[in-house]
Amino acid sequence: MSLTKVSYSMVTGAPFNVLDYGAVGNGVANDTASIQAAIDAAIANGGGTVYLPPGTYKTTASINITDDVIRLVGAQQYASIILSDHTGNAINIATNNQPYVGNLYIKRNTIGARSSRTGVGIRVFGDFAGGSSVQANIEFCRIEGFSKGLDLYACFLSYFGNLTLKQNDISYYLNNNTNDSITFIACSSGTSVSQHVVGNGGAAECGATFIACEFEDAFKFPAISAIGGTGFYYQFTDCYLYENNFGSDAGSTFNFFRFDVAGYLRVIGSGVNCSGMQDARLVFGRRN
């Protein structure tokens, strides 16, 4: 009597398990093609959940999500690990609407010193020029060891929750000022970071709200900035900013917040611990 091996793909509506597509998850085998094959199969099926069971999945190239109906999920934040063993981005999301990533630990195989790190942990890229934005949802992830933890372009009504960003040169990069109405809840940024939040350039307004987030251990000024462009709006509610020691990578002038453009900065119910700070001045166009 012959036996048939049962896989998740044989069950209607089941997630696309990367093990069914050849992934090993032992931290040694190259699982790049297997993870991408599971994503591509889900896209060809009209969408679905791509699941990474507990394990360490070594990748040697970027994982690409090109359709908004894909959910890329692990078992738990520290149980399902994507080990990025290359210099590019770990995950690229180039789509519109509502991609989801959750319960993953995304890290570099070797974490270099500040300013020598490369690539992005998760890059979300919408079609801003074509009038389409991304409603991204990323939660319960740890991202560690990249030049940028998150690189967001053309995100709108997006939610980022319970993220831990450690040892990235920049934790949150709001690219080209094309993001609006994005919310970060219960996220933390720190441990050998250069800057926490950088909003950079562009012609549109940008709005980002941080609620119950922590920012610690930044080594470069300004730790939170809006440089270039025409309008930024940052709001910090019940956040904690502490132990940002700006002396290591900066010159003689230090600023925690810096707005070089017209923008709004609102800090509500947030504790600012200036212990170890050489300066905590606010420099911006307008405030309320």
Image: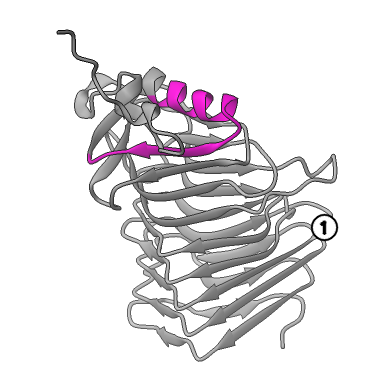
Residue 259 in the image: above or below residue 136 = below
Q: Which x, y percent locates residue 242?
A: 37, 77
Where is residue 181, by image quadrant?
A: bottom right
Is residue 45 rendered magenta in the image?
A: yes
Q: What stretch is highlighted in magenta?
A: 35-54
Residue at which label 1 appears: 204
Is any part of residue 60 visible from this angle? no
User: Mark 1 belongs to which amino acid?
Assistant: Ala
Front residue of 270 and 137: 137
The quarter of the image holding the C terminus is: bottom right
Q: Which x, y percent locates residue 215?
A: 41, 70
Q: Which x, y percent locates residue 13?
A: 46, 39
- In the rendered structure, the answer to whether residue 140 lies left or right of residue 100 reads left
Q: How many labels does the image show?
A: 1
Front residue of 126 and 285: 126
Front residue of 240 and 181: 181
Residue 1 in the image: above or below residue 122 = above
Is residue 85 rendered magenta in the image?
A: no
- In the rendered structure, the answer to whether residue 90 lies left or right of residue 112 reads right
